[in-house]
Amino acid sequence: MATKKKVLLKVIILGDSGVGKTSLMNQYVNKKFSNQYKATIGADFLTKELMVDDRVVTMQIWDTAGQERFQSLGVAFYRGADCCVLCYDVNVAKTFENLDSWRDEFLIQAGPRDPDNFPFVVLGNKIDLENQRVVSQKRAASWCQSKGNIPYFETSAKEAINVEQAFQTIARNAIKLEDGLVFPIPTNIQVIPEPQPAKSGCC
Amino acid sequence: MNKVDMNAFVSQNLFDKFPQRIECIEQWEYKGKKHLFIGTTEGHVLVYDVIEKENQHGNIQVSVIIRDTKLVSKKPITQMSIFDDYNKLLVLTDGDLKVYDLIQFDVTTGITLMKAKGCSTYAVSYQPGSLSLVAAVKKKLVLYGWDGSDFYELKEFNMPDIAKHIDYRGNFIIVCFKKVYNIINTQDGSVINVDADKLTFTTFLQENEFLMVKGSMSFFINTAGNPVRRHSITWQDAPSSMSIYQPFAISIEPRLVEVQILPDPNDPKTISQSLFLPACKSISAKRDIYVSSATSIWRLQPLPILDLVDQMVTKQEYETAINLLQTSKDIIPGIKERLIKIKTSAAYHLFSKEQFQAAMGYFISAQVDPLKIISLYPGLLPAHLQDKLSTPFNIRDIENNPRALPELEHYLVEFRKNKIEYSSPPELLNSGYTLQELVDTTLLKVYIKHKASLIPHFFHLKNHCHIEESERVLLEEKKLTELILFYKSKDLHRKALTLLAKSSNISPNDTISYLSQLGEKHIGIILEHSKWVLQKCPEDALKIFTVDRKDPLSPDDVIPHLKQCAPSLLRPYLEHIINDPISPNKNPEYHNQLVFEYLGSILELIKQTPNSAIVREPGLIPAGKESGELGELRTKIIQFLENSKYYLPEKMLSRFPSNDLYEERAILLSKIGRHEQALAIYAHKLKNFAMAEEYCDRHYNKDSEESRDVYLSLLNVYLKPTDANTSPLLDPALKLLNKHYRSINTPKALSLLPLNTPIDQLYPFFESVIRDNTKTKRDNQIVKNLFKSENFKIKDELSQLKTGVIKITEDLTCPICNKIFLGTQAFVARPDGTALHYHHKNDKQHQSWFE
């Protein structure tokens, strides 16, 4: 049986300044949240090991600077990403409207051969501030649908709502890309269990 | 691996036939003066002054003069080390380790390290600020520290065997045995045992990495015992000793001294020099380098680093040249320019070798202008620019090379992010291109060639693509969808739309969705280009005008356009703007227009009915209940007429037929307060008394002059039809009278009733009215008497209060002025028993006291 190689997934989080990219990452990896805002400079990453199906996967989550003046990442940074997480704040319309640009910008930087099938995941964050909400779930979901069925999650880094589920999906989608690169999986696979060799194999 | 020769050192012979047998050599620098120490088999340590003179060629000529000779031992001087910082000499001879002070070099004052007696070999870890020593004594290692003037014992380690060779750096000692070596961590005493057949010795390269020498090979090993580089160094022969003199490794081999540049881990190469100095066995490489055989000593003098760099450039070993320059500790004038020049050459060289990625790295780091880089890919620059640039070589079919193109893409994308420094290409002057335009247009061409699916994303972002050139290449490649996106990104909407209209394989829906994205700013274009889609598929095209925009279209532009091109869309459009839930349009003109639209359509439908089997009789079927579109439209118009506050009903009446659409007419009449006419329609035209009554219920208001008499009006309508052919409707009139007698003025009602009305039919009415009136009269009587008794009660209270007595004493003061009442001063007595001076009464500010 072929041994499964250890999987390292590179995940990049993008989105406008202040939508909660760092908080989402911190909530997922460290289970911590702080109300204090501190702009990210350049990029920073945390790693987390998780199980996807029966595989142990190490996810390297890159948190980036939303503010343009702190963005120092070159093309090389984006290349080799396995999944891109686009974040916005459901309470600020502009952050949602900018998702288009973030997506296009990412694709140009990363230059994937098949941009239409590159795995993205969209996170609408800060849903704990429900009464200030301006971007409806429907609107976001329909945007995601129009971009090739991007998985969409409504999250709250503060209340730890949906964060775990979102990152699980991120890992799952990222791993698909990794696998796809090694050997494209045909759509129909029949798994036939190998016959177990008889224990008393002495003849 | 190719072997490259270099010429990095020249050797100068200092001694040819040394009178004693040389065992080891060392050097000492003290107060700027250099000294050479020679340890001999005979047990002498000889000290020479070293004199360096520069000859006319700029080469250094070295000569030595004997200064001192000391007989240290009767046995050979096996090993020798000098610590310049402390001016101490360490000597291994006859199994003893002895330390001498060099300032007053006196053999008798040497200190023997007692624990190290029987030492076979030693090693020191000597770095600025730290000195320690390890001595191999039989099957033991003795570790010494340095306190600034003397060695002191630190630790001992037991060994499995007698050490053949040891090396020491930082916290690690490498001990070589016959077929294994041990890595000892001096901090925690841990030992790693590594098998190594044919092991000769090891030598530290840096803190945690050493070279393990095995036959004619050396391997890079870290202090965990693992090989750290994929490559090794191969020597011509088996080295017996080695010194690291950055960036070189100098190896002593039986017939020669071999120097190699320590290979770059990313691109290992053998770059070596052989110095044929036979039978050497000892080397001292500190500030200067000396090597010795038993009878000869040579000084190895490095050539200026730039010489070596030039050699490397000539041999196209650019990376080595760059590394040499970058790691050199010497101050080299013009190093920056030199580096740029070499990197540029390196870039071109690597590129010609099809090592595109590495080449691009050097192009970027040498800040080569983008034009030159792009020109290496023929067919990407506009012809007039490509002609200006001469490319040094051509790689076949590079513009389609799947390894070459991504590197250019990479470069251009990086360039767009302003992350690349470059020098401005002079060729761009008057070329019609800015650098940004050139870069973006080239990127587009690269995408066309190998990643067409990224083009839409590229055009969504702000781009500086050159219009004509981009247009040309997109057309050439028949990338029409992309061309349309391009036009759009450049606000060239007319061009985009013309193309959309022309391309047969693109559906009108694309034009529709394109136009839907343009705002009022582009109204001219929208009107112009919506014509054909409005005609071809009006239902879908309506979206152009009704879609949500940030910059909405003005109905003043849209309505005349629709009237002209697609009159059938006028109604849905008006409905859309008027029923908009967020900002409904309140312009009376549009409301009127919508009414006319409904009316027009309804009349058209009615006109068509005579052809059908059933002849329509106006008013027979209640409005809105008709089958089909007519019913729908009438429901709509009635709702609209009732609910809209903005249309002008006065203007409408003349447009509506007088012999049909009664319901609508009634609503219009009611809107302008002509209740009687409206009611006449319900009563006589529609004969719908319930509706008439409902109408009255809706409009009756006893406080409004206009609406006070609506029931009376209905009565009037019932009893006195204006049309002579219509007979009065007595029955509904009486019913109305009986039901709503309270809201109808009785005398006026009676005067309306025809004289021949049977009195018994009026009986319920009269009874109700009379009962009602009697009741009102009685109620009023009760109220009147209640008021009367109230009046009496108050009068009684007043007289009670008026009869009160007040006594004016000296203690009684007026609360207004706090003074007493004097003599016959007039005063006012208040019901609460206080008194006020009467003269305050004229003071306005005190009025409240008197109320």
Image (cartoon, helix red, strand yellow):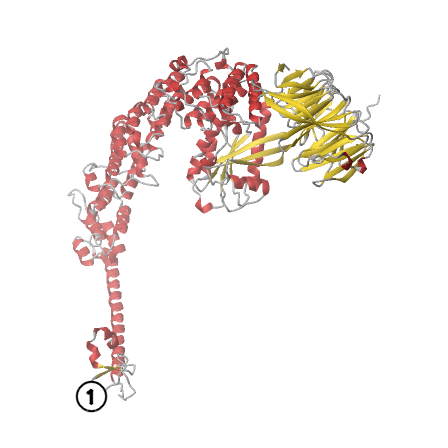
Above or below: residue B238 compared with residue B83: above
Residue B167 spot, x, y in % from top left: 73, 30
Does B347 sit above or below residue B91? above
Q: Using residue B32 as the reference point, say whether residue B464 is left or right of it.
A: left
Location of the C terminus of chain B (image quadrant): bottom left
Instruction: Indicate whether B849 appears above or below A88.
Output: below
Q: Is residue B256 above or below residue B811?
A: above
**Frontmost residue, A62 versus B420:** B420
Q: Which residue is mark 1?
A: B824
Q: Position of residue B157 (x, y in %)?
A: 79, 36
**Label 1: how many Cα within 10 Å (few below 14, some 14–19, many 20+):** few
Residue B804 image offset from top left, x and y in percent: 27, 85
- Image-quadrant location for residue B261: top right
Is residue B169 visible in the rendered image? The answer is: no
Q: Amino acid at mark 1?
A: Thr
Residue B837 position in % (x across, y down): 23, 82
B593 or B604, which is in the foreground? B593
Q: Farthest residue toward the left?
A: B724
- Residue B839: quarter of image: bottom left
Looking at the image, which residue is at 53% across and 15% down?
B349
Which quadrant would the N terminus of chain B be assigned to in this image? Answer: top right
